[in-house]
Image: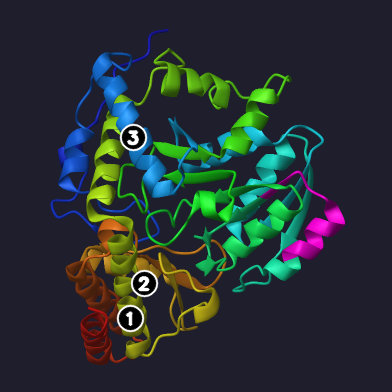
Protein backbone atom coordinates (compact mmCIF):
# COMPACT_ATOMS: atom_id res chain seq x y z
CA UNK A 1 0.00 0.00 0.00
CA UNK A 2 1.35 3.44 -0.93
CA UNK A 3 0.69 6.54 1.13
CA UNK A 4 -1.10 9.23 -0.86
CA UNK A 5 0.18 12.75 -1.24
CA UNK A 6 -1.55 14.97 1.36
CA UNK A 7 -4.24 17.21 -0.05
CA UNK A 8 -5.49 20.59 1.12
CA UNK A 9 -2.19 21.76 2.67
CA UNK A 10 -1.91 25.54 2.54
CA UNK A 11 1.03 27.85 3.11
CA UNK A 12 1.67 29.79 6.28
CA UNK A 13 0.72 32.94 4.39
CA UNK A 14 -2.83 31.63 4.36
CA UNK A 15 -2.80 30.51 8.00
CA UNK A 16 -1.15 33.36 9.87
CA UNK A 17 -3.26 36.50 10.43
CA UNK A 18 -2.67 39.58 8.31
CA UNK A 19 -2.34 41.60 11.52
CA UNK A 20 -0.17 39.74 14.04
CA UNK A 21 -1.32 39.53 17.64
CA UNK A 22 0.47 41.67 20.21
CA UNK A 23 1.87 38.97 22.48
CA UNK A 24 1.39 40.18 26.05
CA UNK A 25 1.01 36.82 27.78
CA UNK A 26 3.36 34.80 29.96
CA UNK A 27 5.59 33.98 27.01
CA UNK A 28 6.77 33.79 24.30
CA UNK A 29 7.20 37.54 23.97
CA UNK A 30 7.75 39.84 20.98
CA UNK A 31 11.31 39.77 19.67
CA UNK A 32 13.42 42.68 18.39
CA UNK A 33 14.19 42.92 14.70
CA UNK A 34 17.89 42.10 15.24
CA UNK A 35 16.95 38.87 17.02
CA UNK A 36 14.47 37.91 14.31
CA UNK A 37 17.05 38.58 11.59
CA UNK A 38 19.68 36.47 13.35
CA UNK A 39 17.20 33.61 13.63
CA UNK A 40 17.04 33.49 9.83
CA UNK A 41 20.76 32.69 9.44
CA UNK A 42 22.38 29.25 9.24
CA UNK A 43 26.14 28.70 9.46
CA UNK A 44 28.44 25.76 10.17
CA UNK A 45 27.84 24.76 13.79
CA UNK A 46 31.48 23.68 14.24
CA UNK A 47 33.29 26.41 12.30
CA UNK A 48 35.46 29.29 13.49
CA UNK A 49 32.60 31.79 13.12
CA UNK A 50 30.39 29.77 15.45
CA UNK A 51 33.25 29.41 17.92
CA UNK A 52 33.58 33.20 18.10
CA UNK A 53 29.82 33.58 18.58
CA UNK A 54 29.75 30.95 21.34
CA UNK A 55 32.58 32.71 23.15
CA UNK A 56 30.66 35.98 23.13
CA UNK A 57 27.45 34.26 24.26
CA UNK A 58 29.32 32.91 27.28
CA UNK A 59 30.84 36.32 28.11
CA UNK A 60 27.51 38.12 27.83
CA UNK A 61 25.69 35.39 29.76
CA UNK A 62 28.10 35.71 32.67
CA UNK A 63 27.15 39.39 32.87
CA UNK A 64 23.42 38.69 32.71
CA UNK A 65 23.70 35.86 35.26
CA UNK A 66 26.07 38.04 37.34
CA UNK A 67 28.76 35.40 37.71
CA UNK A 68 32.50 35.92 37.40
CA UNK A 69 33.59 32.33 36.89
CA UNK A 70 30.32 30.44 36.39
CA UNK A 71 30.20 27.93 33.56
CA UNK A 72 27.53 28.66 30.95
CA UNK A 73 25.97 25.97 28.77
CA UNK A 74 23.32 26.29 26.09
CA UNK A 75 20.47 23.83 25.66
CA UNK A 76 18.68 23.01 22.42
CA UNK A 77 15.26 23.01 23.98
CA UNK A 78 12.75 24.98 26.06
CA UNK A 79 13.29 26.27 29.58
CA UNK A 80 12.07 22.92 30.88
CA UNK A 81 15.01 21.22 29.13
CA UNK A 82 17.36 23.62 30.91
CA UNK A 83 15.61 22.75 34.17
CA UNK A 84 16.16 19.08 33.48
CA UNK A 85 19.83 19.60 32.61
CA UNK A 86 20.42 21.34 35.94
CA UNK A 87 18.55 18.69 37.94
CA UNK A 88 19.96 15.68 36.08
CA UNK A 89 23.56 16.80 36.54
CA UNK A 90 23.32 17.89 40.20
CA UNK A 91 20.99 15.19 41.54
CA UNK A 92 22.04 11.54 41.83
CA UNK A 93 19.70 8.62 42.55
CA UNK A 94 19.17 8.50 46.30
CA UNK A 95 20.18 12.13 46.91
CA UNK A 96 17.96 14.15 49.20
CA UNK A 97 16.24 17.03 47.41
CA UNK A 98 14.17 19.76 49.05
CA UNK A 99 11.78 21.30 46.52
CA UNK A 100 10.06 24.60 47.32
CA UNK A 101 6.71 24.34 45.54
CA UNK A 102 4.81 27.58 44.93
CA UNK A 103 2.90 26.28 41.94
CA UNK A 104 3.05 24.52 38.59
CA UNK A 105 6.65 25.10 37.48
CA UNK A 106 8.33 24.79 40.87
CA UNK A 107 6.51 21.48 41.26
CA UNK A 108 7.93 20.41 37.89
CA UNK A 109 11.43 20.67 39.38
CA UNK A 110 10.33 18.31 42.16
CA UNK A 111 8.92 15.87 39.60
CA UNK A 112 12.14 15.89 37.62
CA UNK A 113 14.15 15.07 40.74
CA UNK A 114 11.71 12.29 41.58
CA UNK A 115 12.12 10.75 38.12
CA UNK A 116 15.85 10.55 38.85
CA UNK A 117 14.99 8.42 41.90
CA UNK A 118 16.00 11.13 44.34
CA UNK A 119 14.51 11.28 47.84
CA UNK A 120 12.33 14.36 47.34
CA UNK A 121 10.74 16.39 50.13
CA UNK A 122 8.27 19.05 49.02
CA UNK A 123 7.59 22.28 50.86
CA UNK A 124 4.21 23.34 49.51
CA UNK A 125 3.81 27.08 50.03
CA UNK A 126 0.36 28.48 50.64
CA UNK A 127 -1.27 29.87 47.51
CA UNK A 128 -0.36 33.51 46.73
CA UNK A 129 2.42 33.44 49.34
CA UNK A 130 6.21 33.54 48.99
CA UNK A 131 8.59 31.15 50.70
CA UNK A 132 10.30 32.55 53.80
CA UNK A 133 13.93 31.90 54.64
CA UNK A 134 12.97 31.04 58.22
CA UNK A 135 10.55 28.32 57.11
CA UNK A 136 12.99 26.88 54.59
CA UNK A 137 15.78 26.72 57.19
CA UNK A 138 13.53 24.60 59.41
CA UNK A 139 12.95 22.17 56.55
CA UNK A 140 16.67 22.08 55.67
CA UNK A 141 17.53 21.21 59.27
CA UNK A 142 14.89 18.46 59.28
CA UNK A 143 15.65 16.86 55.90
CA UNK A 144 19.40 17.60 55.42
CA UNK A 145 19.10 17.87 51.62
CA UNK A 146 21.94 17.69 49.11
CA UNK A 147 20.07 19.99 46.71
CA UNK A 148 17.34 22.61 47.04
CA UNK A 149 15.16 23.60 44.07
CA UNK A 150 13.22 26.86 43.91
CA UNK A 151 11.80 29.34 41.41
CA UNK A 152 12.56 33.05 41.62
CA UNK A 153 9.19 33.75 40.02
CA UNK A 154 6.34 31.26 39.70
CA UNK A 155 4.95 32.03 36.26
CA UNK A 156 1.79 30.00 36.84
CA UNK A 157 0.36 32.11 39.66
CA UNK A 158 2.57 35.24 39.58
CA UNK A 159 4.27 34.75 42.97
CA UNK A 160 7.76 36.14 43.57
CA UNK A 161 10.00 34.40 46.10
CA UNK A 162 11.32 37.73 47.32
CA UNK A 163 13.56 36.16 50.00
CA UNK A 164 15.52 34.14 47.45
CA UNK A 165 18.87 35.68 48.40
CA UNK A 166 18.31 34.86 52.09
CA UNK A 167 17.14 31.33 51.24
CA UNK A 168 20.31 30.73 49.22
CA UNK A 169 22.38 31.99 52.14
CA UNK A 170 20.64 29.57 54.48
CA UNK A 171 21.24 26.69 52.07
CA UNK A 172 24.96 27.51 51.88
CA UNK A 173 25.09 27.41 55.68
CA UNK A 174 24.11 23.74 55.54
CA UNK A 175 26.25 22.90 52.46
CA UNK A 176 23.19 22.42 50.24
CA UNK A 177 23.42 23.21 46.53
CA UNK A 178 20.72 25.49 45.12
CA UNK A 179 19.03 25.26 41.71
CA UNK A 180 17.05 28.39 40.75
CA UNK A 181 14.51 28.58 37.94
CA UNK A 182 14.81 32.12 36.57
CA UNK A 183 12.95 31.46 33.33
CA UNK A 184 10.54 34.40 33.68
CA UNK A 185 12.79 36.64 35.77
CA UNK A 186 16.33 36.71 34.37
CA UNK A 187 17.11 40.24 33.09
CA UNK A 188 13.76 41.55 34.38
CA UNK A 189 14.82 41.85 38.04
CA UNK A 190 17.91 41.47 40.18
CA UNK A 191 19.51 38.05 40.35
CA UNK A 192 23.14 37.78 41.48
CA UNK A 193 24.37 34.24 40.96
CA UNK A 194 27.74 34.66 42.69
CA UNK A 195 26.73 37.03 45.47
CA UNK A 196 23.65 35.00 46.39
CA UNK A 197 25.50 31.68 46.21
CA UNK A 198 23.36 29.99 43.54
CA UNK A 199 24.76 26.76 42.10
CA UNK A 200 22.59 26.52 38.97
CA UNK A 201 20.55 29.22 37.25
CA UNK A 202 18.08 28.22 34.54
CA UNK A 203 16.52 30.43 31.91
CA UNK A 204 14.71 30.14 28.59
CA UNK A 205 15.20 32.45 25.65
CA UNK A 206 11.55 33.29 25.09
CA UNK A 207 10.79 35.47 28.11
CA UNK A 208 12.96 38.15 29.73
CA UNK A 209 15.69 37.86 27.11
CA UNK A 210 13.18 38.51 24.27
CA UNK A 211 14.59 35.70 22.18
CA UNK A 212 12.98 32.80 20.33
CA UNK A 213 11.54 29.73 22.07
CA UNK A 214 13.59 26.55 21.92
CA UNK A 215 17.03 27.77 23.00
CA UNK A 216 17.90 28.02 26.71
CA UNK A 217 20.81 28.63 29.05
CA UNK A 218 22.10 27.09 32.27
CA UNK A 219 24.75 28.63 34.51
CA UNK A 220 26.67 26.35 36.91
CA UNK A 221 28.77 27.66 39.81
CA UNK A 222 32.37 26.51 40.29
CA UNK A 223 31.18 24.29 43.15
CA UNK A 224 28.44 22.77 41.01
CA UNK A 225 30.81 22.11 38.12
CA UNK A 226 33.35 20.46 40.44
CA UNK A 227 30.53 18.19 41.65
CA UNK A 228 29.52 17.37 38.06
CA UNK A 229 33.09 16.51 37.10
CA UNK A 230 33.47 14.32 40.19
CA UNK A 231 30.51 12.10 39.28
CA UNK A 232 31.53 8.59 38.30
CA UNK A 233 28.06 7.25 37.55
CA UNK A 234 26.73 7.42 33.99
CA UNK A 235 24.09 10.07 33.49
CA UNK A 236 20.72 8.77 32.30
CA UNK A 237 20.36 11.71 29.91
CA UNK A 238 22.63 11.90 26.86
CA UNK A 239 21.63 15.21 25.26
CA UNK A 240 21.45 16.86 28.70
CA UNK A 241 24.77 15.50 30.00
CA UNK A 242 26.63 18.67 30.99
CA UNK A 243 30.04 17.04 30.52
CA UNK A 244 29.15 16.17 26.93
CA UNK A 245 27.69 19.65 26.34
CA UNK A 246 30.94 21.09 27.69
CA UNK A 247 32.75 19.54 24.71
CA UNK A 248 30.86 21.85 22.35
CA UNK A 249 30.62 24.95 24.50
CA UNK A 250 34.23 24.97 25.72
CA UNK A 251 36.25 22.56 23.53
CA UNK A 252 34.87 23.42 20.06
CA UNK A 253 34.04 19.75 19.68
CA UNK A 254 30.96 17.85 18.53
CA UNK A 255 28.11 16.98 20.91
CA UNK A 256 25.06 17.16 18.64
CA UNK A 257 24.11 19.53 15.84
CA UNK A 258 23.68 22.81 17.65
CA UNK A 259 20.57 24.98 17.14
CA UNK A 260 22.63 27.36 15.00
CA UNK A 261 19.94 29.94 14.27
CA UNK A 262 18.81 29.90 17.90
CA UNK A 263 22.34 30.52 19.15
CA UNK A 264 22.71 33.45 16.76
CA UNK A 265 19.37 34.79 17.96
CA UNK A 266 20.32 34.49 21.64
CA UNK A 267 23.63 36.20 20.87
CA UNK A 268 21.73 39.23 19.61
CA UNK A 269 19.24 39.09 22.47
CA UNK A 270 22.07 39.05 25.02
CA UNK A 271 23.88 41.82 23.16
CA UNK A 272 20.82 44.04 23.42
CA UNK A 273 20.59 43.34 27.17
CA UNK A 274 24.26 44.25 27.62
CA UNK A 275 23.85 47.40 25.54
CA UNK A 276 20.92 48.52 27.65
CA UNK A 277 22.71 47.40 30.88
CA UNK A 278 21.03 45.50 33.69
CA UNK A 279 20.31 48.49 35.98
CA UNK A 280 18.45 50.34 33.22
CA UNK A 281 16.67 47.17 32.16
CA UNK A 282 15.54 46.41 35.71
CA UNK A 283 14.26 49.99 36.06
CA UNK A 284 12.35 49.77 32.77
CA UNK A 285 10.69 46.54 33.81
CA UNK A 286 9.72 47.85 37.22
CA UNK A 287 8.35 51.10 35.81
CA UNK A 288 6.22 49.39 33.19
CA UNK A 289 4.97 46.66 35.52
CA UNK A 290 4.03 49.12 38.26
CA UNK A 291 2.17 51.24 35.71
CA UNK A 292 0.33 48.19 34.39
CA UNK A 293 -0.65 47.17 37.91
CA UNK A 294 -1.88 50.69 38.67
CA UNK A 295 -3.96 50.69 35.50
CA UNK A 296 -5.56 47.33 36.30
CA UNK A 297 -6.53 48.51 39.78
CA UNK A 298 -7.57 51.91 38.43
CA UNK A 299 -10.17 50.21 36.25
CA UNK A 300 -11.63 48.50 39.30
CA UNK A 301 -10.07 45.04 38.85
CA UNK A 302 -8.14 43.16 41.55
CA UNK A 303 -4.58 41.83 41.34
CA UNK A 304 -4.15 38.23 42.45
CA UNK A 305 -1.08 38.51 44.69
CA UNK A 306 -0.37 41.03 47.44
CA UNK A 307 2.55 43.43 46.76
CA UNK A 308 5.00 41.70 49.15
CA UNK A 309 4.89 38.48 47.10
CA UNK A 310 3.89 39.89 43.72
CA UNK A 311 5.92 39.07 40.64
CA UNK A 312 6.53 42.05 38.37
CA UNK A 313 7.40 40.08 35.24
CA UNK A 314 4.04 38.27 35.05
CA UNK A 315 1.01 40.01 36.57
CA UNK A 316 -2.06 38.04 37.68
CA UNK A 317 -5.56 39.56 37.59
CA UNK A 318 -8.53 38.03 39.41
CA UNK A 319 -11.54 37.31 37.22
CA UNK A 320 -14.97 38.38 38.45
CA UNK A 321 -17.43 35.48 38.80
CA UNK A 322 -19.42 36.77 35.83
CA UNK A 323 -16.47 36.48 33.45
CA UNK A 324 -15.26 33.25 31.82
CA UNK A 325 -11.52 33.43 31.22
CA UNK A 326 -11.55 31.80 27.79
CA UNK A 327 -14.19 34.24 26.56
CA UNK A 328 -12.13 37.20 27.76
CA UNK A 329 -8.98 35.89 26.06
CA UNK A 330 -10.88 35.18 22.86
CA UNK A 331 -12.43 38.65 22.79
CA UNK A 332 -9.09 40.33 23.37
CA UNK A 333 -7.34 38.37 20.64
CA UNK A 334 -10.07 38.27 18.01
CA UNK A 335 -11.45 41.77 18.41
CA UNK A 336 -8.49 43.77 19.72
CA UNK A 337 -5.54 41.68 18.46
CA UNK A 338 -3.89 41.47 21.90
CA UNK A 339 -3.04 38.10 23.43
CA UNK A 340 -2.70 37.51 27.17
CA UNK A 341 -2.59 34.22 29.10
CA UNK A 342 -5.01 32.13 31.08
CA UNK A 343 -3.97 30.24 34.19
CA UNK A 344 -2.77 26.88 35.48
CA UNK A 345 -5.52 26.59 38.08
CA UNK A 346 -6.38 29.91 39.77
CA UNK A 347 -9.29 31.93 38.36
CA UNK A 348 -6.99 34.56 36.88
CA UNK A 349 -5.59 35.89 33.64
CA UNK A 350 -1.93 36.85 33.31
CA UNK A 351 -0.19 39.70 31.52
CA UNK A 352 3.53 39.49 30.83
CA UNK A 353 6.03 42.25 31.50
CA UNK A 354 9.20 40.75 30.08
CA UNK A 355 11.65 42.19 27.61
CA UNK A 356 9.94 43.82 24.63
CA UNK A 357 6.55 43.65 26.35
CA UNK A 358 7.75 46.49 28.59
CA UNK A 359 7.19 49.33 26.13
CA UNK A 360 4.73 52.11 26.85
CA UNK A 361 2.85 51.76 23.55
CA UNK A 362 2.28 48.07 24.34
CA UNK A 363 0.88 48.97 27.77
CA UNK A 364 -1.68 51.46 26.43
CA UNK A 365 -2.84 49.03 23.77
CA UNK A 366 -3.08 46.16 26.28
CA UNK A 367 -5.05 48.09 28.90
CA UNK A 368 -7.43 49.38 26.24
CA UNK A 369 -7.97 45.83 24.95
CA UNK A 370 -8.37 44.37 28.45
CA UNK A 371 -10.88 46.98 29.61
CA UNK A 372 -12.81 46.97 26.36
CA UNK A 373 -13.10 43.17 26.39
CA UNK A 374 -14.52 43.23 29.92
CA UNK A 375 -17.07 45.84 28.84
CA UNK A 376 -17.95 43.83 25.73
CA UNK A 377 -18.67 40.84 27.97
CA UNK A 378 -21.01 42.87 30.16
CA UNK A 379 -18.74 43.66 33.12
CA UNK A 380 -18.76 47.28 34.22
CA UNK A 381 -15.43 48.93 34.92
CA UNK A 382 -13.84 52.37 34.57
CA UNK A 383 -11.56 52.12 31.55
CA UNK A 384 -10.79 55.88 31.40
CA UNK A 385 -9.60 55.79 35.02
CA UNK A 386 -7.39 52.82 34.22
CA UNK A 387 -5.82 54.60 31.27
CA UNK A 388 -5.30 57.70 33.39
CA UNK A 389 -3.65 55.64 36.14
CA UNK A 390 -1.35 54.06 33.56
CA UNK A 391 -0.26 57.43 32.19
CA UNK A 392 0.21 59.09 35.57
CA UNK A 393 2.21 56.19 37.00
CA UNK A 394 4.47 56.13 33.98
CA UNK A 395 5.05 59.87 34.45
CA UNK A 396 5.66 59.53 38.20
CA UNK A 397 8.24 56.75 37.72
CA UNK A 398 10.03 58.40 34.82
Quickly name the residue at label 1. Answer: 374
Q: Is residue 112 left or right of residue 244?
A: right
Q: Is residue 276 above or below residue 93?
A: below
- The quadrant the N terminus occupies is top left
Which label sits on residue 41?
Answer: none
Closer to the N terminus: mark 2 or mark 1? Answer: 2
Which label sits on residue 57?
Answer: 3
Residue 184, given in percent of the width and then of the height, sits at 44, 55
Residue 257, given in percent of the width and then of the height, sits at 39, 17
Residue drawn where x is 20% and y is 71% of the image: 360
Residue drawn where x is 50% and y is 78% of the image: 304
Q: Is mark 3 on a helix, strand or loop?
A: helix
Question: Disc 2 vs disc 1: Cβ atoms closer than 8 Å?
Answer: yes
Q: Is residue 252 above or below residue 227?
A: above
Magenta segment range? 136-148
Residue 144 lies in the magenta stretch: yes
Q: What element carries label 2?
A: helix
Q: Is residue 378 visible?
A: yes
Quickly name the residue at label 2. Answer: 328
Q: Is mark 1 on a helix, strand or loop?
A: helix
Q: Nearer the viewer, mark 3 or mark 2?
A: 3
Query: 43 or 272, which is in the foreground?
Result: 272
Residue drawn where x is 52% and y is 37% of the image: 81
Residue drawn where x is 32% and y is 76% of the image: 292
Q: In this view, does 136 lie above or below 266?
A: below
Measured in 3D between alpha carbons, the distance from the residue under mark 1 to the one under mark 3, in whole angstroms, is: 43 Å
Circle 2 Cα neighbour tier, 10 Å, few/some/many (<14 / 14–19 / ≥20): many
Amino acid sequence: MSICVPQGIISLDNILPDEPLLMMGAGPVPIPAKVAAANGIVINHLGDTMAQIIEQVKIMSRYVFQTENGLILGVAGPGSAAMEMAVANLVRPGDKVLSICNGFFSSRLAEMAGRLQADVSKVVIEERQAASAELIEQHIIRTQPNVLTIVQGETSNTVHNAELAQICKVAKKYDCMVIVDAVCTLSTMELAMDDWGIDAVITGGQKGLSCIPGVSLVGFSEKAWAFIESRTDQLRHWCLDAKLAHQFWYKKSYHYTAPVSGILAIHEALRLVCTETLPLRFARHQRCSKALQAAVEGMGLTLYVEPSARLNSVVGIRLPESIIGKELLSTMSNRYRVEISGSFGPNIVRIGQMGEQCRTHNLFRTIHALGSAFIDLGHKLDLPSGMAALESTLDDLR
